Image (cartoon, rainbow, N blue to C red):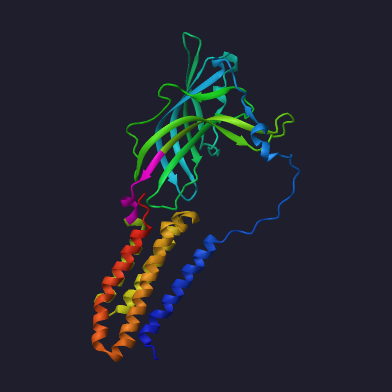
Amino acid sequence: MRVSSRRIRWLIPLVATVLAIVFFSQSMLRKPAPSPAVALPQAQIDWNRLSETLIDVPKPRSAPEELLEVGGYVTNLSDLDLLENRYSIELLLWTLWSGDPELNPSDTLSVLNGIYDGDIQRFERVRQEVRANGDIWTLYRVRTQAVQRWKLERYPFDSQSLRLDIGFADPFQDAGIDVFPSNGFSLNPGLILPGWLIQDIQAYPSKVALMSGLGSEDIPLIRQQTVVFEMFLNRISLLWFTPDFLGYILAVGLCCMSLLISRSRDDLILAAVVSAGGNYVFIAGKLPVTAMSGFIGNLQIIIFVGILYVVAADELIDQHLSRYSQGISSVLRLGLLPSYLAFTLFGIYLIIPFS
């Protein structure tokens, strides 16, 4: 069988482009070799009795005046960085302490999942009052970046939960901490996060388990009390789909055009390959590797399989079946475009996470 020089002209760049994309994908997904670990002596932990081994810090208190109550009001959310796994938040944080004024632990509060880097985190006390009953009310202005592990397998149809852990900087602090009982957490009604819908918020007491005694001889493991502020977001998918997947949309359109016209058909198919490959490289530079294992990875497979289907079917009909029967070749060519669209659209429909 003789292959025309025109087909060789685009076939070589096609193969080179696909190989480049495969190499790039493998390099992104390849894990670095683990460095040799240095064995350090560790205390023996009885995992079957872990709940008995963990020690609450602070210890449970019977007197309510030794409990620090915490509330928050979010004034701004910004810089949701999917690649660096972090986001920025500004809020007003208040505390109410009804115990001994000398033991007020409010100034030792910290954002436990915050990023400490110079001016990135600010925990500034702006006001403090002593109420008639002796309770101490303190107001702080907090600005910080927080670590966020994004779940991007469903991108751009994903939902996220932004979590902010408030606790004592000293894990051995012996005061309790809980959510302010009345309107303990709320958002600025005018807060707008472009591309997202804020669905719900909640605040609740929690605990962070530190699987170490931090050098203490008396405490093998620590379970530190915290207050968690959580915000649930839904991505507005349509605002992200078109700009992020324009290359894929263009690739499908070029394949359809190649099936409708007879001239420059090979050039259109090559342009579709370059467009789809470029879109994948763009997404890979914007999102972490974990996002490539979900909807985006499946979409890439569907687009490239569709391109291969167009190339193979066109080659089979024009170069082989037309030699035996022009009638059969004409009928098959009429059904090529509908079958390609049906395969592509149905495949995309199957991988869209509707739930």
At x 40% / y 39%, what residue is drawn? 232
Residue 261 seen from this side = no
Judge by depth and name the residue closer to the eye, 127 or 102: 102
Relative image position of residue 80 (x, y in whole percent): 43, 44
Horizontally, residue 329 falls left or right of residue 24, namely left
- Residue sitting at x 53%, y 21%: 68
Please name the residue shown 24% across and 81% down the image.
331
40 lies above or below 214: below
Residue located farthest toward the top when viewing the structure as drawn: 132
> Would you say 218 lies left or right of 343 here?
right
**Where the N terminus falls, by quadrant?**
bottom left
Q: Quadrant of residue 333?
A: bottom left
Q: Position of residue 181 (x, y in %)?
A: 44, 21
Left or right: 57, with 331 as reference point: right
Residue stretch in magenta: 232-241
Whether 132 is among the magenta residues is: no
Give above or below for 286 relative to 216: below
Location of residue 306 in the rendering, given as x and y in whole percent from the top left corner: 36, 70
Q: Quadrant of residue 73?
A: top left
Q: Say which of 232 and 275 sits in front.
A: 232
Q: Name which quarter of the figure residue 76 lies in.
A: top left
Q: Which residue lies furthest to the right in this view?
A: 41
Q: Up-down: is 154 above or below 222?
A: below
Q: Can residue 235 be seen by looking at this rendering?
A: yes
Residue 107, percent across and down?
55, 24
Q: Which of 349 and 153 is in front in this view?
A: 349
